[in-house]
Image (cartoon, rainbow, N blue to C red):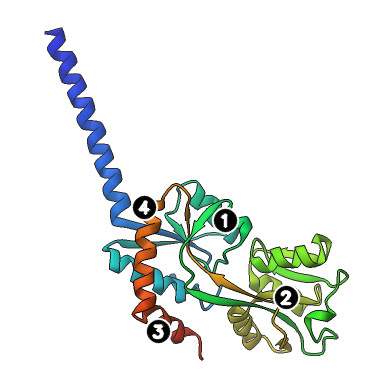
Amino acid sequence: MKKITKILAVVLAALFVCAAFAACSAKSSDKLVMATNAEFPPYEYKEGEQIVGIDAEIAQAIADKLGMELEIVDTGFDSIIPGVQAGKYDMGMAGMTVTDERLQSVNFSTSYATGVQVIIVPENSAITSVDDITADTKIGVQVATTGCIYAEDDYGMDAVSEFNKGADAVQALLSGKIDCVIIDNEPAKAFVAANEGLKILDTEYVTEDYAICFNKNDTELMDKVNAALEELIADGTVQTIIDKYIAA
């Protein structure tokens, strides 16, 4: 009797483990959880409570092609890669540039868009080109972005003020606390359009490629998403989405 009870207990435990594994597998195969920072128009921003933009639409197209449900989680930009590393999110998509430093922590998909870092200054600024920026210039950036990384590398950490949002950096510029803001061209255009007295310098700061980041151990998911993304690039879907938000 005791032997039968033990066998039954083992069988039940095995069934429980299998059921739990199946549930986890079903969850991971049915839902695609994307981390973003909805402060980066037109790539991701909020309309009411909904997160919209280029990245949101491309991610939805990828999920549709894979037969998965897309869930977008809004978090701090500097929390995306740690969250992906920890398995909290399946992927990160937030106008994120591929850099050597980030490649040490995560893997990246094929690039789906090109970004340009530009410089916002007041209209009457003495800064007329990148060459006018020095280590004495007060530079505003969004924390953990490539604009932040490049500015600190080029001008030193003492010259750079980090802000949680690009909009906060722009407000600091308007109030005279900093001399310029280094940020992606598309949100820069939105900020300048929304705030009188600012302009974007004609000189580009740096050009970069945007891609989706993944946990280094989840190559299976990355390969699936990447295959879907490449199909969407090839059939023109990605470019159509980009053109919807960015005028040629």
Amino acid type at mark 2: Val
Whole-angstrom CA distance, mark 2 to mark 3, is 30 Å
Helix or strand or loop: what does disc 2 sit on?
strand
Q: Which residue is mark 4?
A: 220
Q: Amino acid at mark 1?
A: Leu
When asked about the image quadrant of residue 184, the answer is bottom right
The residue that mark 2 highlights is 181
Crowding around mark 2 (Cα neighbors within 10 Å: few <14, some 14 to 19, many 20+) is many
**Amino acid on which disc 3 is placed:** Thr
- Locate residue 193, reporting x and y percent: 62, 88
Q: Nearer the viewer, mark 2 or mark 3?
A: 3
Q: Which residue does the numbered mark 1 point to in the structure image?
A: 103
Q: Earlier in the sequence, mark 1 or mark 3?
A: 1
* Lower position in the chain sequence, tag 2 or tag 3: 2
Asked if residue 139 shows in the view, the reply is yes
Residue located beneath label 3 in the image: 240
Spatial CA span between label 4 and label 1: 17 Å
Q: Quadrant of residue 102?
A: bottom right
User: Which residue is outermost to the right?
Assistant: 136
- As shown in the figure, which amino acid type bears the numbered disc 4? Glu
Between the residue at mark 4 and the residue at mark 2, the CA separation in whole angstroms equals: 39 Å
Residue visible at 41% across and 50% down? 218
